[in-house]
Image (spheres, rainbow, N blue to C red):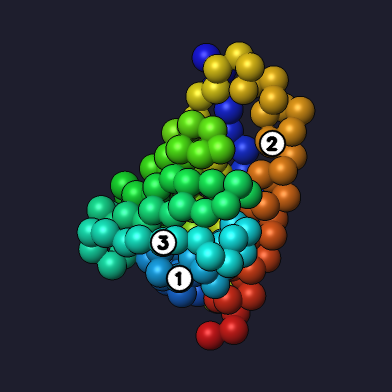
Amino acid sequence: MTDFSMSRSTTVDAPADRVHRLVDDFHHWPQWSPWEGLDPAMQRTYAGPPSGVGSIYRWSGNRKAGEGAMEIVESTPARVAVDLEFLKPFKARNLTTFELEQVGGGHTRVVWTMSGRRNPVMAIAGRLFFDRAIGKDFDRGLASLKAAAEAR
């Protein structure tokens, strides 16, 4: 098995608590997640508390959207960690984190990281395809998160 980690970051012209609310509550993810628009008919279910630790989001959609579940496993003002399980189109379990750092004048630096382990075949496929695609998705998602936080 091979460990991997990939990150993208942006600076948002909004306070950290506003950004935190958007990532700590799965009900807000349709506003900014780069994967929400992959299937207009995607089925979503929510369980547990409405936000924070124990909040769960499950989705099932077309081939592009796939199927899986996320659970918030850590939530502090500076960090939200999500246990991410993909069921389709392939099985994988990763940790996704959002690090929030208040920087001068009401700005927030956001670092979005996904890390986990890959078998040898997925390690090669990851370097050849997945990492580039996920990086582009993260960039799109961070741009949408920035727009959502700054619009409030």
Which residue is label 2 attached to?
A: 131
Near mark 2 (Cα within 10 A), the count class, few <14, some 14-19 or many ≥20, is some
Of the image marks 2 and 3, the number of the one nearer the N terminus:
3
Q: Quadrant of residue 77?
A: bottom left
Q: Nearer the viewer, mark 2 or mark 3?
A: 3
Of the image marks 1 and 3, the number of the one nearer the N terminus:
1
Asked if residue 111 shows in the view, the reply is no
Which residue type carries mark 3? Arg
Which element is circle 1 on? helix
Task: Estimate the x, y position of residue 84 in percent, counting from the top left.
Answer: 43, 43
Which residue type carries mark 1? His
Which element is circle 3 on? strand
Of the image marks 2 and 1, the number of the one nearer the N terminus:
1
Mark number for residue 44?
Answer: 3
Q: Residue at position x 28%, y 67% from top?
A: 50
Q: Residue at position x 25%, y 53% from top?
A: 54
Asked if residue 2 shows in the view, the reply is yes
Task: Estimate the x, y position of residue 6 in percent, counting from the top left.
Answer: 62, 38
State the separation of the CA atoms marked 2 and 3.
26 Å
Task: Estimate the x, y position of residue 126 in percent, counting from the top left.
Answer: 67, 28
Q: Are marks 1 and 3 in contact (CB under 8 Å)?
A: no
Task: Estimate the x, y position of residue 43 in percent, counting from the top left.
Answer: 44, 61
Q: Nearer the viewer, mark 1 or mark 3?
A: 3
Q: Residue furthest bottom?
A: 152
Question: On the picture, is 74 further left or further right than 126?
Answer: left
Q: Are marks 2 and 3 in contact (CB under 8 Å)?
A: no
Which residue is label 1 attached to?
A: 28
Image vertical order of residue 90 relative to residue 43, above or below: above
Question: On the picture, is 52 further left or further right than 151?
Answer: left
